[in-house]
Amino acid sequence: MAEEDNNQIELKEEGAADVQTDLLDEEKENAEEDLDNPIEDEAAEGIDLEQPQGLPWEGTDRDYLYEELLGRVFHILRENNPELAGDRRRTVMRPPQVLREGTKKTVFVNFMDLCKSMHRQPEHVMTFLLAELGTSGSLDGQQRLVVKGRFAPKNFEGILRRYVNEYVICNGCKSPDTILSKENRLFFLRCEKCGSGRSVAQIKAGFVARVGRRKAGT
Protein backbone atom coordinates (compact mmCIF):
# COMPACT_ATOMS: atom_id res chain seq x y z
CA MET A 1 0.00 0.00 0.00
CA ALA A 2 2.82 2.34 0.86
CA GLU A 3 4.50 1.50 -2.44
CA GLU A 4 1.33 2.46 -4.38
CA ASP A 5 1.13 5.80 -2.53
CA ASN A 6 4.76 6.50 -3.31
CA ASN A 7 4.19 5.69 -6.97
CA GLN A 8 1.20 8.07 -7.08
CA ILE A 9 3.26 10.86 -5.48
CA GLU A 10 6.04 10.31 -8.01
CA LEU A 11 3.53 10.41 -10.85
CA LYS A 12 2.01 13.62 -9.52
CA GLU A 13 5.46 15.20 -9.23
CA GLU A 14 6.34 14.12 -12.74
CA GLY A 15 3.04 15.52 -14.00
CA ALA A 16 3.62 18.84 -12.23
CA ALA A 17 7.11 18.98 -13.67
CA ASP A 18 5.73 18.34 -17.15
CA VAL A 19 3.15 21.12 -16.73
CA GLN A 20 5.80 23.54 -15.47
CA THR A 21 8.08 22.62 -18.37
CA ASP A 22 5.23 23.22 -20.82
CA LEU A 23 4.55 26.64 -19.29
CA LEU A 24 8.21 27.62 -19.52
CA ASP A 25 8.36 26.48 -23.14
CA GLU A 26 5.22 28.49 -23.94
CA GLU A 27 6.62 31.62 -22.27
CA LYS A 28 9.87 31.18 -24.15
CA GLU A 29 8.00 30.88 -27.46
CA ASN A 30 5.98 34.03 -26.65
CA ALA A 31 9.16 35.89 -25.78
CA GLU A 32 10.75 34.84 -29.06
CA GLU A 33 7.64 35.99 -30.93
CA ASP A 34 7.85 39.36 -29.15
CA LEU A 35 11.45 39.73 -30.26
CA ASP A 36 10.55 38.81 -33.82
CA ASN A 37 7.64 41.30 -33.84
CA PRO A 38 8.61 44.28 -31.67
CA ILE A 39 5.92 46.83 -30.83
CA GLU A 40 6.26 49.98 -32.91
CA ASP A 41 6.86 52.82 -30.47
CA GLU A 42 6.00 56.24 -31.92
CA ALA A 43 8.35 57.91 -29.47
CA ALA A 44 11.28 55.57 -30.08
CA GLU A 45 13.21 58.21 -32.00
CA GLY A 46 13.02 60.69 -29.13
CA ILE A 47 10.52 63.32 -28.03
CA ASP A 48 11.10 66.89 -29.11
CA LEU A 49 10.42 68.93 -25.97
CA GLU A 50 10.18 72.11 -28.04
CA GLN A 51 7.07 70.81 -29.75
CA PRO A 52 3.68 70.86 -27.98
CA GLN A 53 2.74 67.43 -26.62
CA GLY A 54 -1.00 67.93 -26.84
CA LEU A 55 -3.09 70.83 -25.59
CA PRO A 56 -4.86 70.31 -22.22
CA TRP A 57 -7.93 72.28 -23.29
CA GLU A 58 -8.59 70.19 -26.42
CA GLY A 59 -12.11 68.74 -26.38
CA THR A 60 -13.26 70.99 -23.52
CA ASP A 61 -15.08 74.31 -23.25
CA ARG A 62 -12.88 75.86 -20.57
CA ASP A 63 -10.93 79.08 -21.07
CA TYR A 64 -7.19 79.36 -21.54
CA LEU A 65 -5.03 79.62 -18.45
CA TYR A 66 -2.46 82.41 -18.24
CA GLU A 67 0.48 79.97 -18.36
CA GLU A 68 -1.01 78.27 -21.41
CA LEU A 69 -1.44 81.56 -23.24
CA LEU A 70 2.11 82.60 -22.36
CA GLY A 71 3.53 79.30 -23.54
CA ARG A 72 1.58 79.53 -26.78
CA VAL A 73 2.93 83.04 -27.44
CA PHE A 74 6.53 81.97 -26.84
CA HIS A 75 6.07 78.93 -29.06
CA ILE A 76 4.88 81.15 -31.91
CA LEU A 77 7.80 83.52 -31.29
CA ARG A 78 10.30 80.66 -31.47
CA GLU A 79 8.84 79.50 -34.76
CA ASN A 80 8.79 82.93 -36.40
CA ASN A 81 11.71 84.73 -34.70
CA PRO A 82 14.09 82.35 -32.87
CA GLU A 83 16.51 85.17 -32.05
CA LEU A 84 13.77 87.09 -30.23
CA ALA A 85 12.60 84.18 -28.08
CA GLY A 86 15.68 83.30 -26.11
CA ASP A 87 17.38 81.07 -28.70
CA ARG A 88 19.82 83.73 -29.85
CA ARG A 89 23.54 83.10 -29.84
CA ARG A 90 25.69 84.25 -26.97
CA THR A 91 28.36 86.81 -27.60
CA VAL A 92 31.31 86.42 -25.26
CA MET A 93 34.19 88.84 -25.19
CA ARG A 94 37.66 87.85 -24.15
CA PRO A 95 38.83 89.22 -20.81
CA PRO A 96 41.19 92.22 -20.85
CA GLN A 97 44.88 91.35 -20.91
CA VAL A 98 46.72 93.83 -18.71
CA LEU A 99 50.45 94.33 -18.07
CA ARG A 100 52.43 96.64 -15.82
CA GLU A 101 54.81 99.14 -17.40
CA GLY A 102 57.09 100.37 -14.68
CA THR A 103 55.37 101.53 -11.51
CA LYS A 104 53.09 104.23 -12.91
CA LYS A 105 51.58 102.84 -16.12
CA THR A 106 49.24 100.02 -17.15
CA VAL A 107 49.13 98.46 -20.63
CA PHE A 108 45.84 97.17 -22.06
CA VAL A 109 47.31 94.61 -24.47
CA ASN A 110 44.25 93.31 -26.38
CA PHE A 111 42.43 96.64 -26.52
CA MET A 112 42.15 96.67 -30.33
CA ASP A 113 40.87 93.08 -30.45
CA LEU A 114 38.04 93.92 -28.04
CA CYS A 115 37.13 96.99 -30.07
CA LYS A 116 36.85 94.81 -33.18
CA SER A 117 34.69 92.25 -31.37
CA MET A 118 32.32 95.05 -30.31
CA HIS A 119 32.46 96.67 -33.79
CA ARG A 120 33.24 100.04 -32.27
CA GLN A 121 35.79 102.72 -33.10
CA PRO A 122 38.87 102.50 -30.83
CA GLU A 123 38.79 106.28 -30.28
CA HIS A 124 35.27 106.11 -28.83
CA VAL A 125 36.05 103.13 -26.58
CA MET A 126 39.30 104.72 -25.41
CA THR A 127 37.56 108.00 -24.58
CA PHE A 128 35.03 106.14 -22.44
CA LEU A 129 37.68 104.07 -20.67
CA LEU A 130 39.88 107.04 -19.83
CA ALA A 131 36.90 109.08 -18.64
CA GLU A 132 35.70 106.29 -16.36
CA LEU A 133 39.19 105.62 -15.03
CA GLY A 134 39.82 109.32 -14.51
CA THR A 135 43.22 109.21 -16.15
CA SER A 136 45.02 109.83 -19.43
CA GLY A 137 46.43 107.45 -21.99
CA SER A 138 47.20 106.75 -25.63
CA LEU A 139 47.95 103.98 -28.12
CA ASP A 140 51.57 102.91 -28.47
CA GLY A 141 53.36 101.64 -31.57
CA GLN A 142 51.89 98.15 -31.09
CA GLN A 143 48.32 99.51 -30.90
CA ARG A 144 48.14 98.79 -27.18
CA LEU A 145 46.37 101.18 -24.85
CA VAL A 146 48.81 102.60 -22.31
CA VAL A 147 47.15 104.41 -19.40
CA LYS A 148 48.66 106.39 -16.56
CA GLY A 149 48.17 104.69 -13.20
CA ARG A 150 47.98 101.18 -11.80
CA PHE A 151 44.79 99.29 -12.67
CA ALA A 152 43.73 95.65 -12.45
CA PRO A 153 42.04 93.64 -15.25
CA LYS A 154 38.73 93.67 -13.33
CA ASN A 155 38.75 97.49 -13.48
CA PHE A 156 38.84 97.43 -17.29
CA GLU A 157 36.31 94.58 -17.43
CA GLY A 158 33.76 96.42 -15.30
CA ILE A 159 34.05 99.56 -17.43
CA LEU A 160 33.77 97.56 -20.66
CA ARG A 161 30.57 95.97 -19.36
CA ARG A 162 29.08 99.42 -18.84
CA TYR A 163 30.22 100.45 -22.30
CA VAL A 164 28.56 97.41 -23.88
CA ASN A 165 25.28 98.05 -22.05
CA GLU A 166 25.21 101.70 -23.08
CA TYR A 167 26.74 101.70 -26.58
CA VAL A 168 26.45 98.15 -27.97
CA ILE A 169 23.46 96.11 -26.72
CA CYS A 170 19.99 96.80 -28.13
CA ASN A 171 17.49 97.53 -25.36
CA GLY A 172 14.69 95.90 -27.34
CA CYS A 173 15.93 92.46 -28.42
CA LYS A 174 19.24 92.46 -26.51
CA SER A 175 21.20 91.81 -29.70
CA PRO A 176 24.82 93.03 -29.99
CA ASP A 177 24.44 93.50 -33.75
CA THR A 178 24.05 97.27 -33.64
CA ILE A 179 25.49 100.32 -35.38
CA LEU A 180 26.63 103.42 -33.51
CA SER A 181 26.37 106.56 -35.64
CA LYS A 182 26.57 110.29 -35.06
CA GLU A 183 23.76 112.50 -36.34
CA ASN A 184 23.52 116.23 -35.64
CA ARG A 185 26.09 116.08 -32.84
CA LEU A 186 24.17 113.22 -31.20
CA PHE A 187 24.99 109.51 -31.12
CA PHE A 188 22.32 106.98 -32.10
CA LEU A 189 22.32 103.23 -31.63
CA ARG A 190 20.41 101.30 -34.30
CA CYS A 191 19.77 97.56 -34.14
CA GLU A 192 20.28 95.46 -37.27
CA LYS A 193 18.09 92.66 -35.89
CA CYS A 194 14.85 94.31 -34.81
CA GLY A 195 15.34 97.74 -36.40
CA SER A 196 14.82 99.72 -33.19
CA GLY A 197 16.93 102.77 -32.39
CA ARG A 198 17.72 105.01 -29.46
CA SER A 199 19.93 107.93 -28.62
CA VAL A 200 22.89 107.35 -26.32
CA ALA A 201 24.59 109.69 -23.90
CA GLN A 202 27.72 111.54 -24.88
CA ILE A 203 30.89 110.66 -23.03
CA LYS A 204 31.62 113.29 -20.43
CA ALA A 205 35.04 113.42 -18.84
CA GLY A 206 33.59 115.24 -15.84
CA PHE A 207 31.67 112.14 -14.68
CA VAL A 208 34.25 109.48 -13.93
CA ALA A 209 34.49 106.41 -11.75
CA ARG A 210 37.68 106.54 -9.71
CA VAL A 211 38.50 102.87 -9.89
CA GLY A 212 41.57 101.41 -8.26
CA ARG A 213 43.15 104.76 -7.39
CA ARG A 214 43.45 106.10 -3.89
CA LYS A 215 45.22 109.09 -2.47
CA ALA A 216 48.02 108.51 -0.03
CA GLY A 217 46.80 108.33 3.55
CA THR A 218 43.19 107.30 2.68
Image: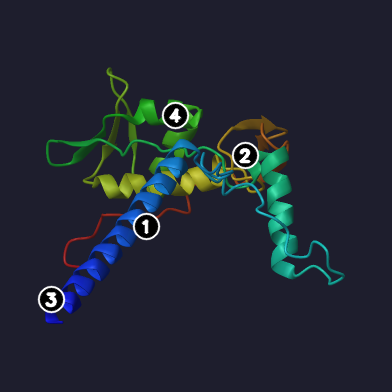
Residue pointed to by mark 2:
83
- Give the SS element for disc 1: helix
Say whether disc 2 or disc 3 marks the residue closer to the N-terminus.
3
* Picture quadrant of residue 211: bottom left
Residue pointed to by mark 4:
117
Say whether disc 1 or disc 2 marks the residue closer to the N-terminus.
1
- Residue name at image x 37 percent, y 26 percent: 113
Identified by mark 3, the residue type is: Glu
Binning the other alpha carbons within 10 Å of mark 4 as few (below 14), some (14 to 19) or many (20 upward) gives few
Looking at the rendered structure, the number of numbered marks drawn on it comes to 4
Residue pointed to by mark 3:
3
Identified by mark 1, the residue type is: Leu
**Which residue appears farthest toward the right when viewing the image?**
61
Nearer to us: label 1 or label 3 = 3
Nearer to us: label 1 or label 4 = 1
Left or right: residue 138 versus residue 190 is: left
- Give the SS element for disc 3: helix
Binning the other alpha carbons within 10 Å of mark 2 as few (below 14), some (14 to 19) or many (20 upward) gives some
Left or right: residue 127 versus residue 7 is: right
Proximity of marks 1 and 3: CB atoms separated by less than 8 Å: no
CA gap between label 2 and label 3 equals 90 Å
